[in-house]
Image: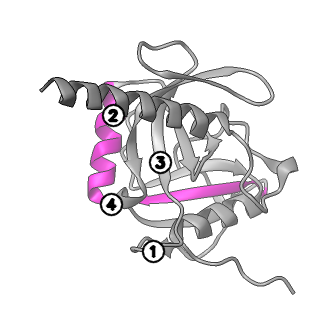
Amino acid sequence: MHTQGFAMKSWKLALAGTMLMTLAACQTLPGADPQATADPSTAAAQPQPQATAATPQPITDNRQAVNLRVFLADSRPQPGWTPVTLKPSGMLYVRPEAIIDRSDLMAIQSATDQNGDGVLVLILSDEGLRKMRAATAAHPGLRLALVVGQTMLSAPGYAAPISQQQLAFGVGSARNAELAARSVAGVEPPSSP
């Protein structure tokens, strides 16, 4: 029993360290447009009008796929939450346990909004929607930190519990959205001409 407690504390410390490293990254995906990164504090967490949308990429077992996680976050300190410095400035406090991950998605889609900015659309499974609804209802008015691989792409606020199966995150450029969707789906990017 004593060794089990030690192992649990060690696991929690390792998780906190991993979270801090993961979320401190807050940078663009490899190959993404660094000039068109999203401001993590201003993107909308609910679907926005879309000017264009790619075909949704189904989520299947795939070794090439990059994990995706969504965490609760707040601009105010919360007990036990990990502080993350945002680039170029600011601080975000992120709950260490993800609400959902890649396994809670049915599909993922890249799109652009009416201004041509990149949008990453998560198409949630029924279980994923249940988890999001429960977490956002229990913690009203916070933020959702979207992490793809080791990179936080967006951390928009939400005003009401999430109730739609499609969840849209502004991610800067259309290229960022496409790369993130393909990475999570485990699909190779198209060849350059």
Task: State the SS at label 2.
Answer: helix
Give percent across and percent down for residue 135: 33, 34
Amino acid tagged 4: Ser
Q: Label 2: how many residues lie within 10 Å, few (<14), some (14-19) or many (20+)? A: some
Q: Which residue is drawn at 63% across and 61% down?
A: 180
Q: Nearer the viewer, residue 106 or 115?
A: 106
The verdict on residue 167 being magenta is: no
Spatial separation of the CA atoms under disc 1 and disc 4: 18 Å
**Which quadrant: the C terminus?**
bottom right
Amino acid tagged 3: Arg
Spatial separation of the CA atoms under disc 1 and disc 3: 16 Å
Whether the residues at callouts 3 and 4 have beta carbons within 8 Å, the answer is no
Q: What stretch is highlighted in magenta?
A: 116-138
Disc 4 designates what residue? Answer: 125
The verdict on residue 127 being magenta is: yes
3 vs 4, front mark:
3
Disc 3 designates what residue? Answer: 69
**Label whose residue precedes the other's in the sequence (2 or 3):** 3
Q: Label 1: how many residues lie within 10 Å, few (<14), some (14-19) or many (20+)? A: few
What label does residue 62 carry, if any? 1
Q: On the image, which quarter does residue 175 sit in? A: bottom right
